[in-house]
Amino acid sequence: MKRVLTVLALLIIALAIGVGGYIYSKQPTRQGQVELQHLHGSVTVRYDERGVPHIRAENETDLYRALGYVHAQDRLFQMEIMRRLARGELAEVLGPKLVDTDKLFRSLRIRERAESYVAALDRQSPAWKALQAYLDGINQYQDSHAAPAEFDVLGIHKRTFTAEDSISVAGYMAYSFAAAFRTEPLLTYVRDQLGPDYLNIFDLDWQPKGVLAKTRAKPGPALAASDWKDLNALARLSEQAMTDNGLPQFEGSNAWVISGSRSKSGKPLLAGDPHIRFSVPSVWYEAQLSAPGFELYGHHQALVPFAFLGHNLDFGWSLTMFQNDDLDLIAEKVNPDNPNQVWYRGKWMDMLSTEQQIAVKGQAPVTLTLRQSPHGPIINDVLGTAAGKTPVAMWWAFLETPNPILEGFYQLNRADTLAKARAAAAKVQAPGLNIVYANAKGDIGWWASALLPKRPAGVKPGFILDGSTNQADKDGFYPFSANPQEENPARGYIVSANFQPVSSTGMEIPGYYNLADRGQQLNRQLSDKNVKWDNDANQKLQLGTTTGYGPRLLAPLLPVLREVVTDPAELKLVEQLAQWPGDYPLDSINATVFNQFLYNLADATMRDELGNDFFETLLSTG
């Protein structure tokens, strides 16, 4: 018995040592020295109490190589999953449930665009050299350390990270902004199946003077019942591809900047509030980078060496979603004598077909046939043989614009003047972003950054377009100078809150803009000339939960509720709602009742007309 117990104790000790060694091998290095190849000088990394690395190097190349190394030791699994998602390679490690997600992302052609994009990059540019150094740091870490525990659990084999992976992740970000997959099928169904009068319940009208200060859409293509089923399935897949997998979505954001003339310090104040769903690990990776002539505290994303948000002692910037419509869905007219031909600009044109193999964990590979019309990739092919008879093509700015976005953010990370920031903003073309900027010299600015296509007059791209007409044609792009933008306005502040922006040229810019209530609330508060703004006041503005949306929506409904509600307890709630200012503190009964009422109102109004599936799509749209 003693011998048995001794052997058992030794086995337990050995197991504990093994488990401890395994866990220790997965830990990041926070102290001591690490030998990194290809450095031209010494680099120091200091971690603060929140685990944020502060990196100091003697030159920029070493700085980015070290950033790649420390970023990888904290976020290698995140990098792996993000590139697999963007490139349609999740099923290889997560199994057959992810095949549809892989099909969707393959159909977006992000992989192909990343390859052509990288092939055209200037190998001598500072941005390219910085990206290569950063990727080298990632790969050196991966090659010299034990794989993260998630790699072991899922059986992921290490692969070299490449520039194509970085561009693919940028493509995922651009796709996550694209509301067209959910909104355009829904609006087209409402217009064509329920009738255009139903569009009146949506806020679709363009306001030429802007939302801070009705045109009837033309009938679209004839779609069959099976096509509508397809389009809604595609909309649900688009939503579920991210939400069901716990992946972060980019959903709006607010930012504003106040000039020195309106602040207590006499210097500009910048506030950025990115609205991104929570995820573990966080979307952002914070790091402070220091080299001779360069200093930045920035917020980075997986596989991207340049900060998307950042500041130093001389300048700072934040981002919001432009929410311009940069993706069109186009229903093609098929040749009845040749299903591989579509009508394009007066003649039948062949569609191109390619095949790809999707590796699936535990199963045989899945073959995916991808077709492309002259308008763009056919995106409902992801539904396979169950798809309806109408091919739906996609025109997407990410695939069609030069989009030197890496160069743009490299320059923005160094934009210590208004002119430099403007030039950098012009290089961000897809996804559309609002860049809100301030510098210590006193300048403030905002640029709606995107390459905006010239669509035919009268075309409403919020609906599915008819490919047999000129609706989907593009006559080039507008110059950046036509984009909405402001620099040092006389009012002394700028607000960006996802509402409809207005170009100085007066042109309409189609988009999926949020309602104006949040922007109007910020505008009212910032326009008070009696306030001299400081950080405390700015914080209260950022953390404010009040908008006019709730009271505005309730105003015409309260008389009806008072007439039809008879229960005394419910009548009391109605009167409480009548006095509610529209705020959302955590303990607010009024806010809770209002949101439940809002859901029930939408459900009673629209579910029977739309059906369960399209109603769920409605709930996922702005």
Image (cartoon, rainbow, N blue to C red):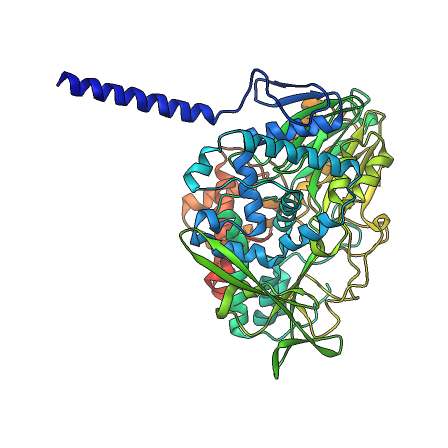
Among all residues in the image, which is located at the extreme bottom?
A: 337
Compared to 358, does 456 lie above or below? below
Q: Within the image, what quadrant is residue 492 found in? A: top right
Q: Relative to residue 176, is residue 8 drawn left or right?
A: left
Residue at (72%, 67%) from the top-left corner? 472
Q: Nearer the viewer, residue 583 or 469?
A: 469
x, y percent for residue 4: 16, 21
Considering the image in quadrants, where does the N terminus appear? Answer: top left
Q: Relative to residue 527, is residue 571 drawn left or right?
A: left
Compared to 104, does 440 lie above or below? above
Question: Can residue 560 be seen?
Answer: no
x, y percent for residue 78: 54, 38
Question: Can residue 130 be seen?
Answer: yes
Q: Relative to residue 526, is residue 371 drawn left or right?
A: left
Q: Nearer the viewer, residue 173 or 243?
A: 173
x, y percent for residue 33: 59, 17
Q: Nearer the viewer, residue 520 or 590?
A: 520
For the image, the number of numbered tags is: 0
Q: Nearer the viewer, residue 271 or 123?
A: 123
Q: Within the image, what quadrant is residue 400 found in? A: bottom right
x, y percent for residue 512: 66, 53
Compared to 538, does 131 lie above or below? below
Compared to 373, does 593 lie above or below? above
